[in-house]
Amino acid sequence: MDDEIMDKVMIDFQAAERKRLEEPASEIGLEPLCAMINNNLRCYDLAMELSNSTLEALPQSYAEQINFEDTCKGFLEVAKETVHQTVSVIFEDPGVQELLVKLYHKEWCEAQVTEYLVATFGDYFTDIKMYIEERSFRRFVESCLEETVVIYVDHLLTQKNYIKEETIERMRLDEEVIMDFFREYITVSKVENRVSILSDLRELASAESLDTFTLIYTNILEHQPDCPPEVVEKLVGLREGIPRKDAKEVVQECKEIYEHSLVDGNPPKAGFVFPRVKCLAQSKGSLWRKLT
């Protein structure tokens, strides 16, 4: 049957594209990845047109048995995966990696990391904007912003220096730099929506009392319901001058708040940050062993 052959051709093409995405992003290269995004979106549009005209030409009883929609959506999925790979090209750039390892260190405090990072992003964005259409470009920018936030959170939780006043001030400046850069490309609300976790964690990192810790943590759970209390434990551990007994009380209180927020033992929904924070995935479970 022609429709079955058509369906198989589309599925095989998508499988070949996915196979290609298994290669390291930096080896595929920026231009070929952008071409893949455009091709798959164009394939989606053409496949939908073809699907509609085919269904219109068929008798009603037969048309009802055919479902091209899932196959057509496959092109969108491939395009989406390719957008993520394009973001990987940027973060695998040796110059970008070199900047990221300096996060929360001396150079970072001296404004030599985040400012340079967004300048590098700017160079990449200028090129990518020429290669892909607007709707994909916006998705790419959002994905790049999310990856930036995830990396900043991960580095905050794994750094070894005590959090001081200048750390808090530099974190605040980071938020401004990131906000100012990304709002040039996507709506302010989309940027705020993703950067807000950085300001929430900054407030958590500078909390002065048990009540403030629990209040801020409760607020974080409203927006990021999967933020584990281990985040609080790590930040409390980076604070100088909090007695061990008080630190334990803060973590215990936050653990109870988190447990009360769960639905059938799971967070009500998954956010874009904490499932991707490497240090939390690696040390899952260690918190509860320490507390019991």
Image (tube, rainbow, N blue to C red):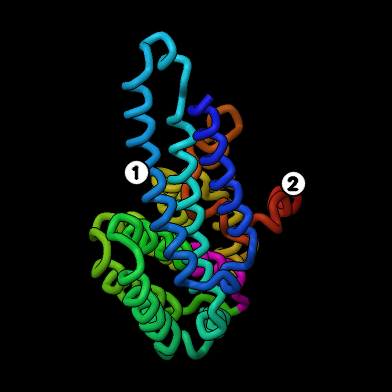
Locate residue 281, reporting x and y percent: 66, 55
Pick whichever, 182 or 194, lies toward us: 182
Q: Main secondary structure of the magenta part?
A: helix
Does the magenta run of residues contain 156? yes
Name the residue carrying label 1. 45
- Depicted 252 relative to depicted 269: above or below: below
The answer to which image quadrant residue 235 occupies is bottom right
Q: Which mark is residue 292?
A: 2
Mark 1: amino acid: Asp
Does the magenta run of residues contain 221? no
Q: Are marks 2 and 1 in contact (CB under 8 Å)?
A: no
Farthest residue in the front direction?
2
Segment colored magenta: 150-160
Mark 2: amino acid: Thr
Pick whichever, 59 or 153, lies toward us: 59
Locate residue 196, reporting x and y percent: 36, 59
Which one is earlier in the sequence, the residue at label 2 or at label 1?
1
Give the CA distance from mark 2 to mark 1. 56 Å
Locate residue 66, reporting x and y percent: 46, 21
- Circle 2 crowding by C-alpha within 10 Å: few under 14, some 14–19, many from 20: few
Pick whichever, 181 or 35, lies toward us: 35
